[in-house]
Amino acid sequence: MPKDVVELLVQRLDTGEILRVKGREAWTLSCLLEAGQSGVIPLERPAPRWSAYVHSLRKRGLTIDTIDKPHAGPYSGTHGRYVLRTTLKVLKTVFAEDKRSRGFSDVVRAAYAQILGHTPDPAS
């Protein structure tokens, strides 16, 4: 299962277009990319609003099929399996841990600079 992906920079191989996807949409897209042609059933990777995230990715021009699969049991019916059909190349992945640690160090660096009364060095 993908780590907590919070941002993806991807390139469409069919058009060359570069897309920056953030938040739950990035997480959803990372799940779809990892699953490949087998696709994802939201029960396998729970999140509150899978259909909304898929809808948003579709609005950005990505082709994502919904394949209805029957299931049995006391509440028999169908469930959807989402399959990404647009071929993408991942250019950059940002994980939640990276953002948290980078954000904290930026805050600490700025506070330290304020205490000392000079501008922080962005390279440190």
Image (spheres, rainbow, N blue to C red):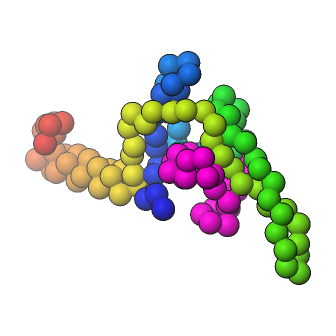
Left or right of 110? Residue 121 is left
In depth, the one of 62 and 71 nearer the eye is: 71
Left or right of 114? Residue 1 is right
Residue at the image position 11 percent from the left and 47 percent from the top = 116
When the figure is inspected, residue 117 is found, relative to residue 98, above or below; the finding is above
Q: Is residue 3 magenta?
A: no
Q: Residue furthest bottom?
A: 74
In depth, the one of 102 and 54 nearer the eye is: 54
Q: Quadrant of the C terminus?
A: top left
Residue at the image position 39 percent from the left and 46 percent from the top = 94
Q: Is residue 29 magenta?
A: yes
User: Percent x, y for residue 100?
Assistant: 35, 55
When the figure is inspected, residue 2 is found, relative to residue 117, above or below; the finding is below
User: Percent x, y for residue 75?
Assistant: 88, 76
User: Percent x, y for residue 61?
Assistant: 66, 28
Q: Quadrant of residue 47 in the image?
A: bottom right
Q: How many marks?
A: 0
When the figure is inspected, residue 116 is found, relative to residue 20, above or below; the finding is below
Q: Quadrant of residue 117 in the image?
A: top left
Residue at the image position 72 percent from the left and 42 percent from the top = 65
Residue 19 in sight: no
Point out the stretch of residues depicted in magenta.
27-53
Residue 90 in sight: yes
User: Percent x, y for residue 17?
Assistant: 52, 21
In depth, the one of 115 and 40 nearer the eye is: 40
In depth, the one of 13 and 117 nearer the eye is: 13
